[in-house]
Amino acid sequence: MISVEAVGKTIEKAIENALLELKAPREDVDIKILSEGGIFKKAKVLVSISEDALPKYEKHKKFVEEEQKELKEAEKEEKKAKKEQVKAEKKEEKQQLKEEKKEEKELEKVEEKKEEKPSKYCQPEEFLSELFKILGKDVEISTLEQEKYITYMINGENLGDVIGHRGEGFYALNTLLKQVAKKGDKKILLDIGSFREKRVESLTLLAKRLASKVAKTGRFVKLDPMNPSDRRIIHTALQDDDRVTTLSKGSEPNRQVIIFPKGE
């Protein structure tokens, strides 16, 4: 039997509370008054589904139980799917990091081999000073030493033709400097007219703009081929963006960065 006890200030209020709990109309129930109540005592009733209406409510109860069971199973499947998605994303990030580290190591090996070729080394500052004299450029050369890097900064007028379109001249000179300079404990970096700093700013802005486009459209974006230094700037700029994922594809010198929607 489906029944419920309820209380209220009056018998009618107690019956109303019981009907609300049973979700049943008055004509489908039997009512038994347990206490009529009083000044300091609430009325109490026992309301039961009548026998002729019982099959309808038992069928409804079974339907509700099955519905709740299906809902629990759906929630369980959803949790499982989310867990698998998080696991897949972590695996993808780990694989990407592994590929980038491998790429960096391969690049370092290539650079080390190139650095071994010259039979005669020179001081970077002397090399740069002589080179810019030959180019007819009046420049100031300063250095910035950090834990792992030493940067040779060159400032002067009309250095755009040395930097070149999209920095071709800059990157070529940077590679040449590494080849002729004696290898030390710190890696050598070059900056001409704050090009490196400006390049980081411009590529970071580009990366964020394209990430917003990818997140909005749901479609990946493939950037033009870049050197490893520029690709690293793009990856770094978007590594904490939870909307997108970046990946390098292709072979040098046509290796490209692709920006995907997260989880694709």
Image (cartoon, rainbow, N blue to C red):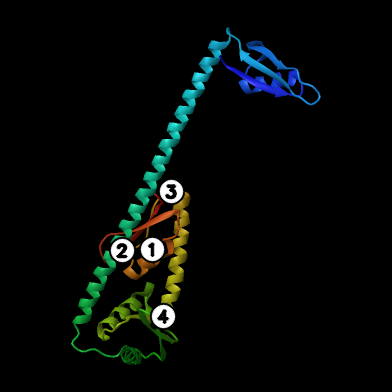
Quote the CA–CA distance across marks 1 and 3: 19 Å
Dots 2 and 1: beta carbons under 8 Å? yes
The residue pinned by badge 4 equals 160
Q: Is residue 254 above or below residue 16?
A: below
At mark 4, the secondary structure is helix
Neighbours of disc 2 within 10 Å: few (<14), some (14-19), many (20+): some
Mark on residue 100?
Answer: 2
Mark 4 or mark 3, which is nearer the start of the sequence? 4
* Mark pair 3, 2: CA separation: 25 Å
* Residue matched to label 3: 218
Callout 3, which amino acid?
Gly
Residue type indicated by callout 2: Glu
Q: Residue at x 38, y 72 (%)?
A: 166
Q: Which residue is mark 1?
A: 235
Asked whether, in this view, residue 204 is left or right of residue 1, the answer is left
Calculate the distance from the C-alpha at mark 4 to the C-alpha at mark 2: 31 Å
Report the residue at 66% width, 11% height from top: 27
Q: Is residue 7 visible?
A: yes
Q: Position of residue 213 (x, y in %)?
A: 46, 54
Tell me whether the residue at label 4 lies in contact with that at label 1, contact meaning CB atoms closer than 8 angstroms. Answer: no
Mark nearer the N terminus (4 vs 1): 4
- Asked which secondary structure carries label 2, the reply is helix
